[in-house]
Image (cartoon, rainbow, N blue to C red):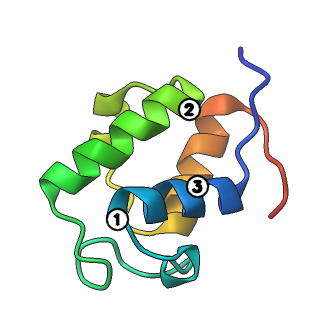
Amino acid sequence: MTTATVNIEDLRALIAGALETEPDEVTDTAHFTDELEIDSLMLLEISTRIENAYGIPVDDVVISGVQTLAELHTFLTSRLGGEQSA
């Protein structure tokens, strides 16, 4: 098991970077498709960045069904077995 930790602020910055927006635009509960307008191609880009940063396979992130930053953080934390507070 890996010892990597997931910081929600790092995830916020990762998503904001993919969306080319400011991190404060990516709130914990903003719905990916409805509020952030993340389509399937953008989700693939974000998933690829997550795989590069945390080693979680792209397919695992895509099929996880997460729809908010908070859900993504919970999913990654459970997969990596550790959490770093925000």
Which sits earlier in the primary sequence, circle 2 or circle 1?
1
Q: Is 74 left, or right, of 16 in this rendering? A: right
SS under mark 2: helix
The quadrant in which residue 20 appears is bottom left
Which residue carries the number 3 mark? 11
The reply to whether dot 3 and dot 2 touch (C-beta < 8 Å) is no
Residue type of the residue flagged with mark 2: Ala
Which residue carries the number 2 mark? 53
Residue type of the residue flagged with mark 3: Leu
Separation (CA) of disc 2 from disc 1: 17 Å
> What residue is at 64 percent from the left and 40 percent from the top?
78
Q: Quadrant of the C terminus?
A: bottom right
The reply to whether dot 2 and dot 1 touch (C-beta < 8 Å) is no
> What residue is at 15 percent from the left and 54 percent from the top?
40
Q: Residues within 10 Å of mark 1 (few under 14, many from 20)?
A: some
> What residue is at 47 percent from the left and 38 percent from the top?
50
